[in-house]
Image (spheres, helix red, strand yellow):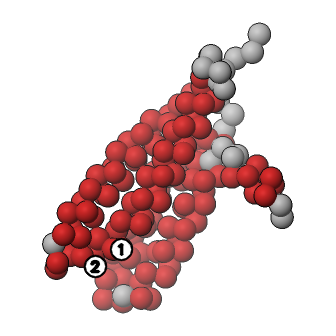
Amino acid sequence: MNFARITQTVMRPGASDLACVGLLIIGSIVGPTLEPSHRDLWTLAPLVIAAPILCAGVLQCLSSQIATLVAGVIHALLFLLYSLGLLLSAFLFVTVLFAGTAVVLAPVCLLLALNSAFTLTRVLWQRKGPRGGSGKTA
């Protein structure tokens, strides 16, 4: 596979969301085996996080502009949530007792916040067009 094909696949609407959902599903499978004492937490938490991302990814796969705007609103709220998660992990890292939680929480929040930022820029780019117009051609 060449670089252009990989870039074209990633730039498809909803592809990054579905990739993040796949990673979260893998995390919900691997997590309980790594820490069996908290099996319910490691099984359900990634799936709860993946649900709105999956909905936004499916909405982006539709060809409707309204569905794309709804996906953009979902990602704006998710970006806010994951940014607050990054702030929480920074505070937890300072606390010695919860530094391990911060090490686990920060990369997940960072990845999902970057995914939401990427999707928001794609939605805004698609809506405004490459030159700042309305995205419609005459």
Q: State the residue in front, 83 or 54.
A: 83
Q: Are marks 1 and 2 in contact (CB under 8 Å)?
A: yes
* Residue 125 percent coordinates (x, y): 60, 31
Amino acid type, callout 2? Gly
Quadrant that contains the C terminus: top right
Left or right of 51, for residue 19 = right
The image shows residue 79, relative to residue 128, as above or below, that is below
Q: State the residue in front, 48 or 30.
A: 30
At 55% from the left and 43% from the top, the residue drawn is 119
- Distance Cα–Cα, label 1 vs label 2: 6 Å
Q: Is residue 74 visible?
A: yes
Q: State the residue in front, 66 or 98.
A: 98
At 46% from the left and 74% from the top, the residue drawn is 28
Q: What mark, if any, has residue 100 been given in the picture? A: 2
Residue 122 is drawn in which quadrant?
Answer: top right
Q: Which residue is mark 1?
A: 104
* Residue 123 percent coordinates (x, y): 57, 34
At 41% from the left and 84% from the top, the residue drawn is 32
Amino acid type, callout 1? Val
